Image (spheres, grey):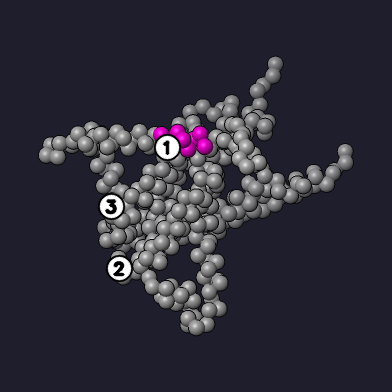
Amino acid sequence: MGITGQDLILACSAIGAGLAVIAGIGPGIGQGIAAGHAAAAVGRNPGAQGQIMSTMLLGQAVAETTGLYGLLVAMLLLFVKPLVG
Amino acid sequence: MSIQPLIMASDNIDFMIHGLFSYNVLGHEVWITTSHVCILIVMLLLIGFAFAANRTFAKADALAAPSGFQNALELIIELLSKMVEGSMGNAAPRYFNYLGTIFLFILLSNISGLLGLRPPTADYGTTLPLAIITFCLIHFAQFKHNSLKSIWVDMCSPLPPWLPIWFPINLISECAVPVSLSLRLFANVLSGTVIMALVYGLLSTIAIAWPSVLHIYFDLFSGAIQTYVFTMLTMTYISQQLGDSK
């Protein structure tokens, strides 16, 4: 069974997609830090819980963006296959 | 005796946008896709809701205690206006129409996965126009509330205004706003759609009842959070431009 150039490109695209979603590590750490500090803030000032929650969610959603870029690259590689000519 | 495999072949997965029929515009082939149909359904639901709300308020007795549908409407309006006022202050009434509209539209689009539709916001063609409208509104507010000189000083900001080395970098970061706004919403909703398609496509033999938990997370929770984030970021960007007049 010969491996054609197209097979090689598809296999490498799959590996590349796997590497691209490693980008999820960064937002994971960042969101964890944000949630931890928010918990500490609620502990110090339970009255401001609503505001702390909304600020935390906003910050986490912004931090999540970089991970989603990695996800998008992985999806493009897997389903749109831009490298296959 | 054949045992049905737990994980199906991969050609069962289907989360792409399908073209329904095509027509020619100036020699280009243009498709009506599932996204158009889903947007139309969402829009019809919202328009019907708006008409019902209008009738309810037109018939409402201002002195009697509200009940039923009117209660729910007042709750929604109060929540929205509290959210807008919290971050925009005095300018809130001017932008409330736009912000309330995109909030309801994105929310209903995101949770339309529960109605069996493919969420329209999982199509980049839906989220990019929303972000471009926001972008235009940000710069409308900027030119309305700031003089040209202060905009120029702001665009050259870390360096003095007679040395515009920083200007192209600031220009790029301005242009990144609609891209990141739209990609954030699009990628979040798309990831939920893909995961639900994988669950129903690959694990269809054991996908009984428990995917509802995933629906709660990906459609309701994530959809509501992303709606809130889109509206909140729009408000933050606009109120940054309002300056002292806020």
Q: Nearer the viewer, residue B226 or B21?
A: B21
Pointer 3: what residue? Answer: B82
Q: In which quadrant of the rendered image does the C terminus of chain B lie? A: bottom left
Residue B122, percent from left and from top: 53, 43
State the separation of the CA atoms marked 2 and 3: 20 Å
Q: Quadrant of residue B47?
A: top left
Amino acid type, callout 1:
Met
Q: Give whichever of discs 1 and 3 has the lower sequence position.
A: 1
Residue B32, percent from left and from top: 57, 35
Pointer 1: what residue? Answer: B43
Q: Is residue B241 shown above or below B201? A: below
Apparent side of residue A59 relative to residue B192 in the rendered image (left or right): left
Q: Give whichever of discs 1 and 2 has the lower sequence position.
A: 1
Quick check: can you spot residue B198? no
Segment colored magenta: B36-44
At horizontal 67% and vertical 53% (from top left) the residue drawn is A19
Do discs 1 and 3 share a chain?
A: yes
Magenta segment main secondary structure: helix
Q: Dot 3: within a 10 Å radius of its alpha carbon, few (fewer than 14), some, or many (20 or more) residues?
A: some
Q: Nearer the viewer, residue B1 or B54?
A: B54
Pointer 2: what residue? Answer: B245
Q: Give whichever of discs 2 and 3 has the lower sequence position.
A: 3
Chain to which the residue tagged by mark 1 belongs: B
Q: Helix, strand or loop at disc 2?
A: helix
Residue A16, percent from left and from top: 70, 52
Quick check: can you spot residue B126? yes
Chain to which the residue tagged by mark 2 belongs: B
At horizontal 29% and vertical 47% (from top left) the residue drawn is B79
Q: Is residue A46 shown above or below B110? A: below
